[in-house]
Image: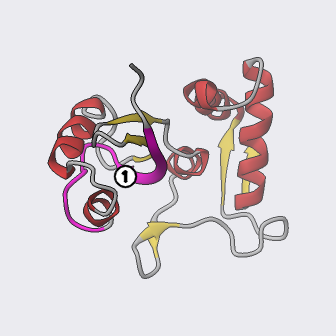
Amino acid sequence: MAKKLAGTMKLQIPAGKANPSPPVGPALGQRGINIMEFCKAFNAKTQEMEPGAPCPTVITYYQDKSFTMDIKTPPASYYLKKAAGLKPVGKRNRPRGAEAPGRETVASVTVAQVREIAEAKMKDLSANDVEAAMLIIVGSARSMGIEVKG
């Protein structure tokens, strides 16, 4: 017999760094999901990824307290900031894009770097081929104030 679906939730968790502290623990606990079981499974699935890379995760949980998770690739902005070499700034010590994209350029990336990012993100993008995926990544770069150089 099929499991009875209780709901789904989305979290963005650093790869290999899931722990029961907020925001992961309370979000899972109030839905009746075993927090330690989730943390161990998530950390095991993301151990080959770059440590600390933000991983959007869709968690589907069932009435019998079991769950499944779908871990997606890190956001394009994460890859773009890394390729552009943006240094961490601000209160949270994170790299940031331009404050006025379109008028201000904070960094640049090459077409080869854009292709590499598009290939890494291909399974999560709604593109039929790498060229279409590259256009999506170029759009993300433009909205962050990152220039793509030929």
**The magenta stretch spans residue 9:** yes
Q: Is residue 143 visible?
A: yes
91 on left or right of 20 = right
Residue 54, horizontal then vertical, whole percent: 42, 50
* Image quadrant in which you'd find residue 133: top right
Quadrant in which the C terminus is drawn: top right
Residue 57 seen: no
Residue at 49 percent of width and 48 percent of height: 82
Question: Residue 71 is drawn in which quadrant?
Answer: top left
Q: Residue at x 74, y 31 (%)?
A: 134
Residue 52 is one of the magenta-drawn residues: no
The outermost residue toward the front is 1
**In this picture, which residue range is highlighted in magenta?**
5-22
* Picture coordinates of residue 81, whole percent (x, y): 55, 53
Kindly indicate the quadrant of the structure image that contains residue 123: top right
Q: In front: 11, or 59? A: 59
Height in image: 150 above or below 32? Answer: above
Q: Which residue is mark 1?
A: 13
Q: Amino acid at mark 1?
A: Ile
Residue extending farthest to the bottom is 91
Q: Which residue is at a point 44% across and 67% down the rendered structure image?
A: 94
Residue 42 on image: x %, y %: 27, 39
- Which quadrant: the N terminus? top left
